[in-house]
Amino acid sequence: MNLDRIRKKVSNGFRPFALETSGGKRYEVPHPEFIMIGKGVVAVLGRDDSVTTLDALHIVAVEDLPGPGSKRDR
């Protein structure tokens, strides 16, 4: 995964998103404070304060999540 794509999602009018890995796991990023992006890794803070470090090579998809007030939240 090109980390610049993830950096843009965090800095250009943030909207919640999820990262999917080659192993099929998903990591939700509900707010920009829940993610740190390095040169080749991404760290995601879970809702339970756990930290998961993902190698950029294993991130295969970035998916937008519904934001507050969306039809899915109602």
Image (tube, grey):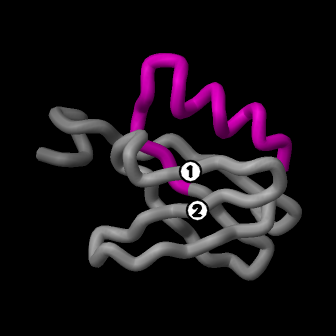
Identify the residue at horizontal 52%, vertical 66% (top origin). Answer: 27
How many numbered dots are placed on residues in this image?
A: 2
Q: Residues within 10 Å of mark 2 (few under 14, many from 20)?
A: some
Tag 2's secondary structure? strand
Tell whether position 19 is magenta.
Answer: no
Image location of residue 54, percent across then percent down: 69, 69
Q: Quadrant of residue 40?
A: bottom right
Q: Quadrant of residue 50?
A: bottom left
Q: Residue furthest left?
A: 74
Quadrant where the C terminus lies? Answer: top left
Residue 36 tag number: 1
Image location of residue 58, percent across then percent down: 81, 68
| Three-letter code for the amino acid on which mark 1 is drawn | Met
The image shows residue 65, relative to residue 27, as above or below, that is above
Identify the residue at horizontal 74%, vertical 59% (top origin). Answer: 41
Q: Which residue is mark 2?
A: 43
Image location of residue 38, percent across then percent down: 72, 50
Q: CA distance from mark 2 to mark 1?
A: 5 Å
Foreground of the two, 24 or 8: 8
Q: Quadrant of residue 2?
A: top right
Identify the residue at horizontal 49%, vertical 46% (top origin). Answer: 17
The magenta stretch spans which residues? 1-18
Residue 54 tag number: none
Tell whether position 6 is magenta.
Answer: yes
Apparent side of residue 63 relative to residue 56 in the rendered image (left or right) = left
Apparent side of residue 48 relative to residue 64 in the rendered image (left or right) = left
